[in-house]
Image (spheres, helix red, strand yellow):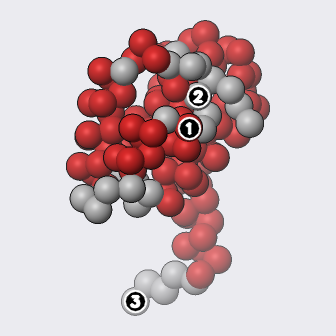
Amino acid sequence: MLVMRTAQLEALRASAQQRFEERLMAHLGRIFPRPCAVLGEAGLRHLCRDGIARARTYGLRSERDLCKYLSLMLVFGHNFDREQPWAAEILQLGSAPGRRMERLYATAQERAGEGQGTDVA
């Protein structure tokens, strides 16, 4: 029988997280080249880590939802979830996380002209 120790599981989890961050940074760099260039690699990594942590507080877990959340941070600003009333309202709904993200992203597309850009805090 295969036995995995806690330290081994944690190492696997950390490795998967790092690979996801790398894919996310590459994707965001392709879609949002200008703001990502302004942030630089260290700033973008900070944005990704902070954004992932914050998105998880709203129950968002899937890579797709996390990617969309980070995209919204780049378009509407680092604290869009706190500063945009429409975003805060949607994120606090009692619906399933995936549904909230769908609604948030659709509403954001309607409001794209209101974007503030990246302001890494």
Q: CA distance from mark 1 to mark 2?
A: 9 Å
Q: Residue under circle 2?
A: 77
Give the residue displayed 58% in from the left and 19% down from the top.
117
Residues at circles 1 and 2 in contact by the CB criterion of under 8 Å? yes
Element type at marker 3? loop
Query: As rendered, which of 45 and 68 lies closer to the eye?
Result: 68
Q: Residue under circle 3?
A: 1
Q: Earlier in the sequence, mark 2 or mark 3?
A: 3
- Give x and y (percent) for residue 88: 44, 46
> Does residue 26 show up?
no
Q: Residue under circle 1?
A: 83
**Residue 13 sits in which quadrant?**
bottom right
Q: Earlier in the sequence, mark 1 or mark 2?
A: 2
Mark 2 vs mark 3, foreground winner is 2
Q: CA distance from mark 2 to mark 3?
A: 49 Å
- Give x and y (percent) for residue 35: 62, 16
